[in-house]
Amino acid sequence: ESALLRYSLAAPGRVWLEVYDLGGRRVASRDLGVQSPGARQAWLTRDDLGPGMYFYRIGIEDPAGGAPQAMGGKVVFLK
């Protein structure tokens, strides 16, 4: 089982993914590297986490030194 996470970049930047359990503990993180503008996607698999509900955050660091941007959502993996 896997979830496709879609996001969009308005400008180039370093992108990372963080995943949190219901208790707010970070259970996974992944550096997705520097990416160019446009529609992007990342896969999150149950093998990475196990069954349960999780919240994810995709962060985008501005290479020009501006404030980082973030977007997020939730994903549920069943048994």
Image (spheres, rainbow, N blue to C red):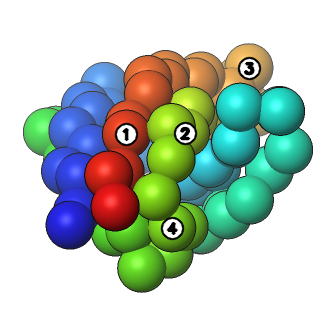
Few, some or many C-alpha atoms within 10 Å of disc 2 (few <14, some 14-19, many ≥20)? many
Residue 8 in the figure: left or right of residue 60:
left
Would you name the residue on which mark 4 appears?
A: 50
| 4 or 58, nearer to the observer | 4
> Tag 3, which secondary structure?
loop
Q: Nearer the viewer, mark 2 or mark 4?
A: 4
- Which amino acid is tagged 3? Ala
Work out how far the residue at label 4 is from the one at label 3, CA to CA, in angstroms.
33 Å
> Tag 2, which secondary structure?
strand
Marks 4 & 3, CB-CB < 8 Å contact: no
Work out how far the residue at label 1 is from the one at label 2, CA to CA, in angstroms.
6 Å
Would you name the residue on which mark 3 appears?
A: 67
Work out how far the residue at label 1 is from the one at label 3, CA to CA, in angstroms.
30 Å
> In x, y percent, where is residue 73?
44, 23
Which residue: 67% across, 63% down? 29
Marks 1 & 2, CB-CB < 8 Å contact: yes
Would you name the residue on which mark 1 appears?
A: 76
Would you name the residue on which mark 2 appears?
A: 54
Work out how far the residue at label 1 is from the one at label 4, CA to CA, in angstroms.
10 Å
